[in-house]
Image (cartoon, rainbow, N blue to C red):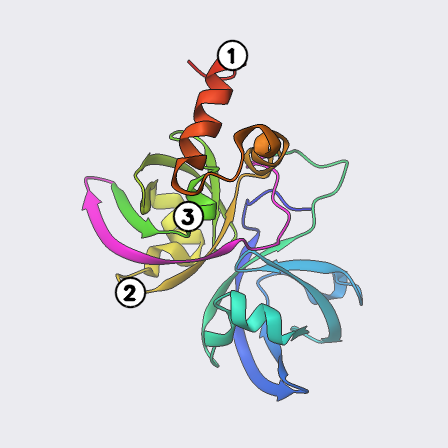
């Protein structure tokens, strides 16, 4: 389990094909002496397992399914990635509940600097947008963010200078593909309401919204 608060960035050292998948090695921004074989670390929001530890270097195996459903297959030597080690029960809980299981990828449609902030409009799969709400949480390349606006095809996030500086988001440009994990609570609520909402195709999102209003969750 993760929180979406990026601990540091890392740099890809090598990418090698293995049995249909891939093995990546990276240099993290933390001391690898504290890492353990088999521990979980989120890389651009994807939960991966440490399979090899060297001085100042960690390696991870990526399955064919993960390569297909995330942007990790696009990583090349020298690329920067967001890193977060799994949360501990004794630590502060910032961000929001993040599983490290990406729901889909989106594409950065526009980047708009406005004063000290930068607004990013990102396309997203329908299944992600259907459980997203304005002012709700969403994870983009592992970063816990707040949705400031959304429509039927995109959502918008506002990035403060600190976040732009300590994560890879500051380097995003139009056309970049990003990993998206929707809010875990939203997904559970949608699943619980699914039997009542039915499978009415295009009316499903409106049905869920109506049910939430009926039950007093939203006004």
Residue at coordinates 59% horizontally, 39% vertically from top-left? 184
Q: Is residue 189 visible?
A: no
Label 2 environment density (alpha carbons within 10 Å; few <14, some 14–19, many ≥20): few
Residue 139 is situated, as x and y percent measured from the top left of the image, at 49, 46
| Vertical side of 137 occupied by 79: above or below | below
Q: Mark 2 — residue? A: 175
Q: Earlier in the sequence, mark 3 or mark 1?
A: 3
| Vertical side of 171 occupied by 135: above or below | above
Q: Between residue 166 and residue 216, name the one nearer to us.
A: 216
| Vertical side of 195 occupied by 128: above or below | below
Residue 102 within the magenta-colored segment of the rendering: yes
Q: Is residue 124 left or right of residue 195?
A: left
C-alpha distance separating marks 3 and 1: 24 Å
Q: Is residue 5 left or right of residue 156?
A: right
Q: Is residue 179 visible?
A: yes
Residue 210 within the magenta-colored segment of the rendering: no
Q: Mark 1 — residue? A: 216
- Snapshot quadrant of residue 49: bottom right
Residue numbers of the magenta segment: 94-116
Residue 141 is situated, as x and y percent measured from the top left of the image, at 48, 56
Residue at coordinates 68% horizontally, 87% vertically from top-left? 19
Badge number at residue 126: 3
């Amino acid at each position: 389990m993760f929180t979406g608060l990026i601990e540091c960035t890392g740099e890809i050292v090598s990418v090698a094909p293995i049995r249909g998948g891939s093995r990546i090695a990276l240099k993290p921004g933390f001391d690898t002496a504290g890492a353990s074989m088999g521990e979980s670390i989120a890389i651009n929001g994807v939960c991966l397992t440490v399979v090899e530890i060297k001085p100042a270097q960690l390696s991870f195996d990526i399955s064919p399914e993960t390569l297909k459903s995330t942007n990790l297959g696009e990583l090349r030597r020298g690329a920067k990635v967001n890193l977060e080690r799994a949360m501990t029960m004794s630590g502060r809980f910032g961000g929001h509940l993040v599983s490290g299981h990406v729901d889909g990828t989106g594409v950065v449609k526009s980047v708009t600097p406005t004063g000290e902030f930068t607004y990013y409009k990102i396309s997203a799969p329908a299944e992600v947008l259907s459980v997203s709400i304005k002012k709700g949480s969403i994870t983009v390349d592992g970063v816990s963010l707040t949705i400031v606006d959304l429509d039927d095809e995109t959502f918008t996030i506002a990035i403060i200078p600190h976040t732009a500086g300590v994560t890879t988001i500051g380097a995003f440009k139009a056309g970049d593909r990003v990993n998206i994990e929707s809010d875990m609570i939203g997904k559970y609520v949608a699943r619980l309401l699914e039997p009542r909402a039915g499978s009415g195709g295009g009316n499903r999102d409106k049905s869920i919204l109506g049910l939430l209003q009926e039950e007093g969750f939203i006004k």
